[in-house]
Amino acid sequence: MIRQRGTSIAELLVALAIGSVVSLAAVQLHSNSIRAAVTIDQFELLADKARILQRILHSEIAGAGMAPCGATTPVHDWTGGEQERAACSLPANGGLEMNNGTLSVSRFEPSPEYADLSYQQIISGELGVALQLSGSPSTLPEINEYLLIGDCTLLHRVRSNGGSGSFLSISGQDLDPTQLPESGWIWRVSAISGIPGTTSEVIDPRLHQTAIGRRVSPGGADGVAVLTIDDDPALRGLTELYFSFSSCENPSQFMHANDINDWQSVCAVRASTILSASGPSTADQLDWPLTITIPVQGRL
């Protein structure tokens, strides 16, 4: 009897079937691995976007409306007012204002180096109180112009009586020169408030005004937007961007911009968005809801 060598058709079909199953499993495993790698990359991209967005919004919004020394320094008002802090009004109603979906932010550099003038001695006598300035500036505050003077531990609101050379005369209601620091800085309230001085129509370089908004990217996917600051792209891949605001009286309740009557009273801004990261296909898009709350420094 002669025994045949080789593989029967049945054995071959079984082997092919097993090989196909193994190959499909390997392909599926490889596909899942690629998909998992893509998802991890998307999560990392979203995390990076979240960090960037948080850093941008904090840097642009937190300092809104800052006055000298950071707007938290107490103020002794010798002009008859009841001011307790240097929270002077700035452009855009106190540093913040929402118009047509765009958030306008104005802020003043809170550092003594940005003061208008500095003084090194207080001179008081029968003729009143005068400050000996550090140098002889080309222009001096005008008569009856409001000033903030001090050393950032306590600011004093006084009136200018004019001056000449390196001397500036000041006055106030029951002004006590012994309570003023012997040396310090001088800020013109008109400049802090964003009002161009009477001697110059040049916008104060210490005032920074930015516009934060969103717009759909040209040629981009429907609904995918780009965050813009002063109309320059800052962050791509937002499907939403909404701002809400809380007042100092009720900081836990956030309201729509239309419900804000006094923007000077806004103490915090909340930004709500959905960040998006696309995979190899549109079906692989990953969305990440994100809420960022930014307290306005010196308001609470």
Image (cartoon, grey):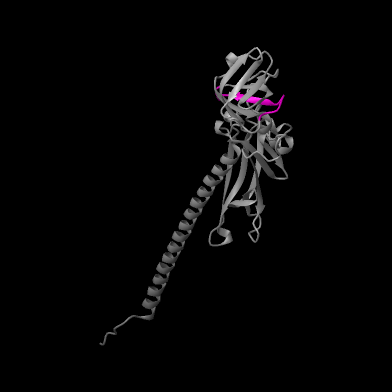
Comparing 138 with 197, the one in front is 138
Comparing 182 with 228, the one in front is 182
Comparing 202 with 7, the one in front is 202
Task: Indicate yes or no whether the magenta region holds residue 261.
Answer: no
Percent x, y for residue 143?
71, 25
Compared across the picture, whether 83 is left or right of 133 comes to right
Compared across the picture, whether 20 is left or right of 162 comes to left
- Please give the name of the residue rendered at 68% of the width and 17% of the height, measured from the top-left corner: 172
Magenta region, residue range: 140-153
User: Residue 244 occupies which quadrant of the picture?
Assistant: top right
- Magenta segment main secondary structure: loop
User: Residue 171 occupies which quadrant of the picture?
Assistant: top right
Q: How many numbered marks are there? A: 0
- Please give the name of the residue rendered at 39% of the width and 71% of the height, measured from the top-left corner: 19
Whether residue 3 is visible to the viewer of this picture, yes or no, is yes
Q: In the rendered view, would you say 7 is above or below 212? A: below
Percent x, y for residue 266?
66, 32
Percent x, y for residue 65?
64, 34
Task: Indicate yes or no whether the magenta region holds residue 147.
Answer: yes
Q: Residue furthest left?
A: 1
Q: Quadrant of the N terminus?
A: bottom left
Comparing 238 with 70, the one in front is 70
Percent x, y for residue 299?
62, 29
Compared across the picture, whether 39 is left or right of 13 comes to right
